[in-house]
Image (cartoon, helix red, strand yellow):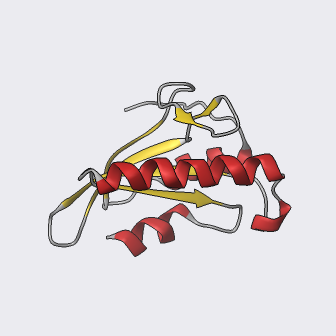
Amino acid sequence: MYDSFVYDSDKERETISRSIIDEIIVFGKIPRNSIKVPLYFGGTTSPDFMYVLKKKNGEHIVNFVVETKGVDEASDKRRKEDLKIESAKVFFQRMKEDGLNIVFEEQLNDDDIVNMIRKLV
């Protein structure tokens, strides 16, 4: 559909370029501030990507939401980034408890988006 794409980091560029597999119905980079996840210490955060996936049985996972982090290990993140991830996990878990079919995951440098998706479908 497009000849070019916008990204904020090398990890995001890699994620976008690897997101061309049969299990993905549609995916996109989430515009900043379009999904405002409230932070308990003030402010908001917004995840990086969303996917609509197709399971092997044909069922759709309505939303797979991904936050990319350009670090090799979770321990390499700053404390504030950990708090943002935890806030997003709680936010999307509450949506799931309300009946929405949403999965949120963090993606580090060593996490391949294709493997993450194939574990879900």
Left or right: residue 82 compared with residue 121: right
Indicate the quadrant containing the N terminus: top left, top right, bottom left or bottom right: top left
- Up the image or down, 26 lies above or below 112; here it is above
Position of residue 67 measured from the top left corner of the image (x, y, whole percent) = 58, 49
Question: Which of the image's four quarters has the C terminus?
Answer: bottom left
The mark total stands at 0
Task: Decide which of 13, 68 is in the foreground and name it.
Answer: 68
Report which quarter residue 50 is drawn in.
top left
Residue ID at (54%, 46%): 16
Q: Residue furthest left?
A: 58
Which residue is found at the position 48% from the left and 25% from the top? 34
Whether residue 20 can be seen here: no
Please say whether residue 11 is visible from this viewpoint.
yes
| Residue at the image point whose x is 72% and y is 54% from the top | 82
Q: Position of residue 38 (x, y in %)?
A: 56, 35
At a point 69% along the width and 35% down the height, the residue shown is: 8
Residue situated in front as seen by the camera: 64 or 98: 98
Q: Is residue 114 left or right of residue 76?
A: left
Residue 2 picture location, percent across and down: 43, 30
Residue 45 picture location, percent across and down: 61, 35
